Amino acid sequence: MSARGVLVLLTVLAAGAAPAAAQTEPPPGGALYQKLCSQCHGEKGDGNGIAAPRLMPRPRDFTTGKFKIRHTPSGALPTDDDLRKIIREGMPYTSMPPWPQLSDQQVDELVAAVKSFSPDFANPERKPVPITIPKAPAYSEESAKKGKEVYARIGCPACHGEIGRGDGPSAPGLKDDAGYFIRAADLTKRWTYRGGPTREDIYRTFTTGVNGTPMPSFAESLTDEERWQLVDYIVSLDGREDPGYAELVQVQWTTDDIALEAPDKARELFASAAAAYFPVVGQITEPGRAFHPSANGVTVKAIYNARDIAFLVTWHDMRADVSGHNAPDLPVPPEEDKGEVAADPADEGGGFFGEEEVTEEASADDFFGEEEGTADAGTESEFSDALALQFPATLPTGARKPYFLFGDAQNPVDLWFVDLAKKVATRYKGAGSDSLTLEEGEDVTAVASYDKGEWSVILKRSLRATGGVTFAESQYVPVAFSLWDGAQRERGNKRGLTRWMYLYTMPRETPSPLWPMLRAAFIVLVVEILLIVWVRRRQTPVSPVGQEG
Amino acid sequence: MSLPIIWWVALLLLAVQLVLWKSRAGTFLWTLVSCFSFWVFLRFGFTVPVPQSVISLYMGIALLAAAAYVTSSRDRLEGFTGPLVRLCTEPARRPLLYAVVLLLPALAAFAVYRQMNVKLEAPAFGRTIHPAPPDSITVHDKALNLTTLDNPYRTLEKSDPPAFASHVANGRRVYYENCFYCHGDALRGDGMYIHGLNPIPTNFADAGAIALLQESFIFWRISKGGPGLPEEGGPWDTAMPAWEKFLTEEEMWDVTLFLYEFSNQRPRAREGVHE
């Protein structure tokens, strides 16, 4: 910790916030808290730091005494160890950073700071008593299968969706205690869990609940056996504990005809192609920024035959927004660029989220019956979901690529855009975010479907086309993806995107390594024998009484 | 425990050398072990893995050096070839000879197999992290000469500390409204979105980063962002925004002040200017 930095900041705070008082009294929470945490959590710990308006979820308001990740029962305060763990490890996929670089003493100081903002911590009656998490039995398929029933019976699908993709009928209307929209976790992506990806973490989450959010505690309603079954089911949704982000997608060679008329059959063509999972982040480089895009990843598979190339692009979305329209060049007004997360998105967006009252204390039974009726409530949105694939207009010969945000004047890009309300592909030529032109022709065709919280879009083009890259065998081609979620009013520059990734068209036949291996072995063997013979020849005259016999 | 890995590897290899020396190993064994040690050092001695091409290059040099050493005197040459000749000729070493004769082709075959099954990786291009800035730039219709440009608010540090502090405070606001998503809340280049970026921002908290740069350079990078970089900086890949589209000139200077204040560093002075 730099003393000078703190000093300047203290002067800063003194100059800014409370001119008279700050000079004599230490700032609330102490200097370390003010330097490292106050920009988000606020100088008074009320969650209103300067960064807060653009954050989602919002920074914790410490004065409420409500904490998400706890080893204590629903509604209780966290233990010091809980707070220590959060400060050390952060909360993945939120702006709450991990602090591995601090000393133990500094972390303790921060724990004390956090606690100082809420009088609850001083109340002896509210002293946190941790629950004990029994030792986890080994994972089994059997138990996961039973867990699926528990999952459905107890009402998790209402928020988390039938197979956990965060697309339950109640999901679009969920709000936290402060009235902000909150996303029901996508249970298939354990690496995004705020409280950790392990089986013990999951057990703890639904046993203690997530205070301050609609995520309830299921402390009474389940036996211990059922709990581990539920945990195993959630783990079985996706085997990955971390996302394994790719940088390259292999385009598999196929001899089959690529026909999109029957989408289900078209999907089967991709069965043997390797999936690449790319990270999606917000477009925050050009005006019209998306500080918190809905999507955080996109899965891509690709195939080609002698005539065509095709991509299967899938991603999770809480709801299919198929009303309204979308385009990569729709303007985003500058006010929206301020990124302020509205306290009530339903008000701002013209009531496109279904209104719904779900309270924290709600018991599991409350969720029955709610599943019907809410699914279609308020699904009209002004903007539809959309997808774009981006390729350089001509294949780069060296390092020089087009600018990753829709190209630049010298190096244009070729955009394959699908508005999912229309489900037809169009092409744009991009020479920069403010210079997109619609291209004529129907080179690219697409089919799209939405099922259980997941969009699947197949796009197809012939290997060569006017005004686009010609795809050939054994070739690297830069590719990037953009995703728009209509429900969050994403359009134009306001979107989730990937940086430039690559595709590689796999050779039609993978040569067998056997012959080259044998050849190498043989050459080495011959050289060895020649060497040995040579050495022996040269040695024999020196020792005429050959021992070799 | 806290010793960097490079020291651990170096210590281990020194120990090996010591054992060789104590046991009076011959030239042959010594050369072999030394070359291998060098490879171990390159391959495992660094936290950021050394690229294969660089390893090959250094190993080539090392082998040449070994060859020069071995052939530098008759004794050494004999010391090196002696064990090999004995292996080829002495009947007592036959089993070993056969083993070697079989092992080497097997290794060659394995190497070919490895080579044909390398994991496919996206092509990587090098970029210059701090390319030379242009002589002048135009920001908000104002022409600025970068060779003579200074932070107009830097002098307040001495002349008017409260005013300076409020500029820093404003820079802090700008930073936490705009920059920390990529540059990280503690300026360590580890913001919440960097898993989606390549290149990623440098660690400003590191002593070898902004302290080596002039404030005019920082101002150029902030105002013109990725697209303002020359070709060698790879402007097409970096997500660094051109902040002139969002911020006033004063805000860009203020956030520059904040970068130095938060990380407790001083900018590099312009040549010929002494503080």
Image: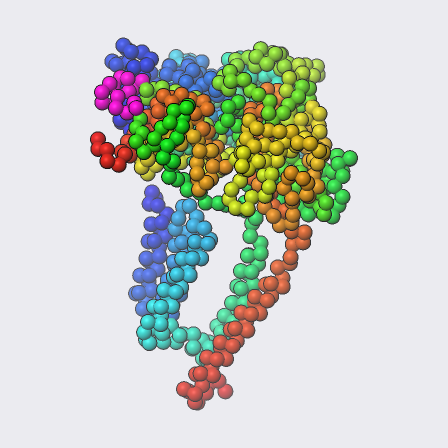
Q: Position of residue A200 (x, y in %)?
A: 52, 31
User: Where A212 sits versus A462, above or below?
Assistant: above
Q: How many marks?
A: 0
Q: Is residue A113 visible?
A: no
Q: Residue furthest right?
A: A261
Q: Position of residue A258 (x, y in %)?
A: 74, 41
Viewer-side residue, A274 vs A289 = A289
Does the magenta portion include A202?
no
Viewer-side residue, B219 vs A12 = B219
Q: Residue at x 71, y 33 (%)?
A: A441
User: Where A336 sits versus B147, above or below?
Assistant: above
User: Where A525 sits versus A444, above or below?
Assistant: below
Q: Give the extent of the magenta segment.
A: B152-166
Q: Residue furthest bottom?
A: A545
Quarter-of-image position of residue A225: top right
Quarter-of-image position of residue A375: top right
Q: Residue at x 36, y 49 (%)?
A: B6
Does the magenta portion include B164?
yes
Side (left or right) of A279 relative to A451: left
Viewer-side residue, A86 vs B218 = B218
Q: Position of residue A155 (x, y in %)?
A: 64, 21
Side (left or right) of B261 relative to A386: left
Q: Position of residue B190 (x, y in %)?
A: 43, 33
**The N terminus of chain A lies in which quarter of the figure?**
top left
Viewer-side residue, A100 vs B69 = B69
Q: Residue at x 73, y 40 (%)?
A: A268
Q: Is residue A332 visible?
A: yes
Q: How is the image coloured?
A: rainbow
Q: Residue at x 34, y 36 (%)?
A: B209
Q: Magenta span: helix, strand or loop, mainly?
A: helix
